[in-house]
């Protein structure tokens, strides 16, 4: 192994207590990295962070699948000498967070690039990605390739994302599962959070984590830790925005009250604005904020209306109002 590749495959890029096993069908256990590296199969990506794109190609001479597909030289190929099947791995220079609601755009980009590369190499789309052939283990014939990691954009240059139609199951496998779980969970959370206003955030987090596990029903489900990580991120994201919506509304009503009116002192008007506004308009304002977020995430008017329990015409009116506010 070249010095550069030894440096690339280092503990800083690997889980400190990864899953590992002595072989397919055998018990999968968690071990310290030093012990896990003695096994032929182990986890190389952290639960919520992707440093490595791993493709499982189950065909003879799979180690050359990247070349046949017109893709760049991988970081390594770990080949099974008995049948020629291989894991083809590309190292990323910048890791992608896979369980952060604020990072969804980057995650969608990762999912699109991974799906397109997998299709070109005819890789197994149902590969879970949890366990990888250990390139340092003697059981595999490892071919070391590119000595420097790739930026995701570099890999995208080898595939024409604009003219590639995603595979029919792209949202049910690979990193598409993360995107699908995020979308389904957030759609549920934008509505469900209403029932937890005034409660401790811990109750809300538990509810979202439970729902995340319920929605993790893919043919090859995400690891439970990863699904719960997505749940934690969505819970934090939606809770913060719901609280922000309430605070903005109260501030707006209080400001209106301060302007005063005939027969009313500014203090009385402010109090009226605060109490009356909170009672009569807070729910609608929260829905408007949620509608804006859903539409920004690509939901149609119909999907947004169904999620928030209002008509499509109401969503359309809110959208017009938001556009006016954005462009006075």
Image (cartoon, helix red, strand yellow):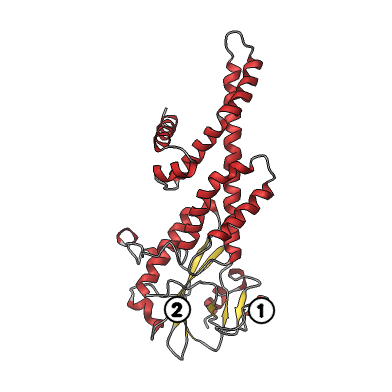
User: Residue drawn at (58%, 40%), measured in percent from left and top?
Assistant: 242
Which corner quadrant of the image does residue 69 belong to?
bottom left
Residue at the disc numbered 1: 34
**Horizontal relation, residue 198 to residue 74: left or right:** right
**Horizontal relation, residue 230 to residue 319: left or right:** right
Do residues under tags 2 and 1 come within 8 Å of each other at their CB atoms? no
Whether residue 261 appears in this view of the structure is yes
Which corner quadrant of the image does residue 312 belong to?
top left
Q: Is residue 50 above or below residue 248?
A: below
User: Residue drawn at (50%, 60%), measured in percent from left and top?
Assistant: 178
Given the current orientation, which residue lies at the most extreme left position?
163
Q: Which x, y percent locates residue 5?
A: 52, 77
Q: Which x, y percent locates residue 101?
A: 54, 52
Q: Is residue 58 above or below residue 150?
A: below
Nearer to the camera, 29 or 43: 29
Element at label 1: helix
Residue at the disc numbered 2: 145
Q: Which mark is residue 107?
A: none
């Amino acid at each position: 192994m070249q010095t550069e590749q030894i440096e690339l495959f280092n503990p800083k890029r690997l889980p400190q207590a990864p899953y590992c096993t002595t072989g397919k069908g055998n018990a999968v256990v968690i071990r310290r990295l030093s012990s896990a590296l003695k096994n032929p199969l182990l986890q190389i990506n952290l639960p919520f962070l992707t440093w490595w794109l791993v493709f499982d190609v189950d065909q003879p001479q799979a180690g050359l699948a990247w070349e046949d597909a017109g893709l760049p030289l991988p970081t390594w190929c770990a080949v099974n000498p008995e049948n020629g099947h291989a894991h083809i791995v590309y190292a990323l220079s910048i890791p992608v967070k896979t369980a952060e609601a604020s990072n969804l755009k980057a995650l969608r980009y990762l999912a699109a690039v991974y799906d397109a590369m997998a299709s070109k190499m005819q890789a197994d789309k149902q590969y879970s990605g949890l366990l990888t052939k250990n390139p340092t283990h003697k059981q595999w014939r490892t071919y070391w390739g590119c000595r420097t990691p790739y930026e995701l954009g570099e890999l995208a240059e080898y595939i024409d994302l604009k003219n590639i139609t995603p595979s029919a199951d792209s949202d049910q496998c690979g990193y598409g599962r993360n995107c699908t779980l995020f979308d389904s969970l957030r759609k549920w959370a934008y509505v469900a959070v209403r029932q937890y206003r005034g409660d401790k955030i811990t109750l809300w987090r538990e509810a979202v984590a439970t729902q995340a596990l319920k929605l993790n029903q893919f043919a090859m489900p995400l690891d439970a830790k990863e699904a719960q990580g997505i749940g934690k991120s969505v819970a934090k994201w939606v809770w913060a925005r719901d609280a922000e919506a309430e605070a903005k509304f109260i501030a707006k009503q209080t400001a209106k009250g301060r302007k005063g009116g005939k027969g009313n002192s500014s203090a009385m008007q402010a109090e009226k604005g605060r109490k009356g506004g909170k009672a009569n308009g807070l729910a609608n304002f929260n829905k408007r904020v949620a509608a804006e977020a859903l539409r920004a995430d690509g939901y149609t008017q119909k999907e947004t209306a169904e999620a928030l329990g209002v008509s499509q015409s109401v969503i359309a009116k809110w959208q017009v109002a938001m556009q006016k506010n954005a462009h006075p």
